[in-house]
């Protein structure tokens, strides 16, 4: 009799414990699956009110991408107080559990939104919208995809597949979750000073120069790139005759491995470098204004900027100087007095904090009469 009572007590205890755990830790309902085209159309979604023992259901939107490109999505919680959206890549479409979570973001508060632009490779993906706890309501989701154009670096993810760089020709590549590094090779027939120009939309990447034995000659951490504001970096290196490699790779944050910094990049190797310095800037034009000078010059490839110098002395005593970026090809300067003023321009290359200047242009003279 005592044994039977103990059995009932144990049953009631375990049953009550299960009920309490179910109430405090509700289980999510099965996800609803949808098939969509990432064509930029707005999707109206809803997370229904959950039952007593469960949380709101999640929704999954599946799509296939035929090539590399940029995936953009915007999630707006309309009446859901707390929810999240995740982007997954299916490693094996036949096994729904074999996935890679690329982005996960909590959207706390109704009428809040989250936008993300992500560079991806071809493959199968899905976006999942889900609530936290027992939240429910409506949301809007917009998904669009733009195929990459002009990519020349696909399939060179190893030393054996390294792509030969053509001097002065830009190589365009894309780094994604599945293609996290690219390799290039440079053949030197004699000792030269090369300028490596690296422009990247990747928020964090490494640029490495290696010799034929894969020994690192130079490794640089490049941060701050984005699609709207690409990061420009240049590296000047004197290399003897021989074979060399360039490796471009994603820098993954070990604390947030799902936030992989993907994106496009451009690489140019310039050999048009005077070993004694950069050649002189050409076609410098100076016009006088009422209170200053208008200076214009011809662009030079492979430089990081220009320095303009002007003075009232032809020997440039007590001269004033300005620095401008490589995108600038003209400048207006204000002079303190009227009379004859002399102007010259030179280019420079930035190597870390060190600047290497080229030769001065021919001196131009203009007369200011407005003071």
Image (cartoon, rainbow, N blue to C red):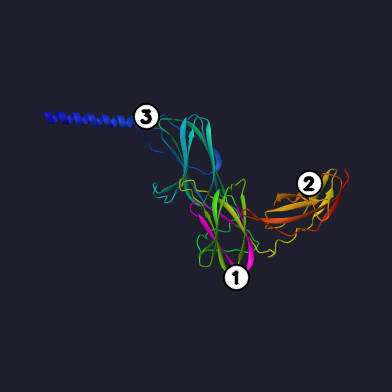
Residue for point 31% across, 32% down: 21
Between disc 3 and disc 2, the foreground one is 2
The answer to whether 138 appears left or right of 319 in the picture is left
Please say if 333 is above or below 166. above
Residue 175 lies in the magenta stretch? yes
Q: Nearer the viewer, residue 132 or 68?
A: 132
Across and down, in percent, residue 159 comes to 51, 64
Q: Nearer the viewer, residue 323 or 158?
A: 323
Across and down, in percent, residue 273 comes to 68, 63
Q: On the image, numbered disc 3 is attached to which residue?
A: 51
The answer to whether 366 appears left or right of 26 in the picture is right
* Prevalent SS, magenta region: strand
Kindly report the distance in space between the C-alpha atoms of the residues bearing marks 3 and 2: 70 Å
Residue 328 lies in the magenta stretch? no
Kindly report the distance in space between the C-alpha atoms of the residues bearing marks 1 and 2: 44 Å
Q: On the image, numbered disc 1 is attached to which residue?
A: 241
Q: Quadrant of the N terminus?
A: top left
Residue 281, picture quadrant? bottom right
């Amino acid at each position: 009799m005592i044994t039977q009572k103990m059995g009932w007590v144990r049953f009631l205890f375990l049953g009550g414990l299960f009920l309490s755990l179910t109430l405090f830790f509700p289980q999510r309902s099965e996800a609803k699956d949808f098939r969509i085209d990432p064509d930029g159309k707005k999707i109206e979604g809803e997370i229904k009110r959950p039952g007593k023992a469960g949380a709101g259901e999640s929704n999954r939107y599946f799509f296939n991408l035929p090539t590399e490109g940029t995936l953009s999505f915007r999630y707006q919680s309309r009446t859901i107080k707390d929810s999240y959206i995740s982007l997954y890549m299916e490693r094996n479409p036949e096994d729904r559990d074999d996935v890679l979570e690329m982005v996960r973001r909590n959207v706390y508060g109704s009428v809040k939104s989250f936008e993300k632009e992500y560079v991806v490779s071809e493959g199968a993906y899905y976006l999942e919208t889900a609530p936290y706890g027992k939240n429910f309501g409506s949301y809007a989701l917009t998904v669009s995809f733009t195929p990459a154009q002009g990519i020349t670096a696909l399939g060179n993810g190893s030393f054996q597949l390294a792509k030969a760089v053509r001097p002065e020709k830009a190589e365009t590549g894309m780094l994604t979750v599945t293609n996290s590094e690219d390799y290039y090779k440079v053949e030197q027939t004699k000792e030269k000073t090369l300028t490596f120009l690296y422009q990247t939309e990747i928020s964090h990447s490494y640029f490495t120069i290696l010799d034929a034995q894969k020994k690192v000659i130079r490794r640089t951490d490049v941060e701050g790139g984005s699609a709207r504001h690409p990061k420009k970096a240049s590296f000047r290196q004197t290399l003897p005759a021989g074979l060399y490699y360039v490796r471009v790779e994603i820098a993954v944050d070990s604390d947030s491995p799902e936030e992989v910094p993907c994106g496009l990049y451009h690489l140019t190797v310039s050999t048009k470098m005077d070993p004694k310095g950069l050649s002189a800037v050409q076609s410098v034009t100076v016009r006088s204004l009422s209170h200053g000078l208008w200076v214009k010059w011809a662009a030079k490839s492979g430089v990081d900027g220009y320095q303009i110098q002007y003075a009232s002395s032809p020997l440039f005593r007590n001269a004033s100087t300005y620095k401008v970026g490589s995108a600038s090809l003209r400048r207006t300067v204000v002079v303190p007095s009227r009379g004859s003023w002399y102007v010259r321009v030179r280019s420079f290359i930035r190597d870390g904090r060190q600047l290497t200047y080229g030769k001065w242009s021919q001196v131009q003279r203009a007369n200011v009469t407005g003071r």
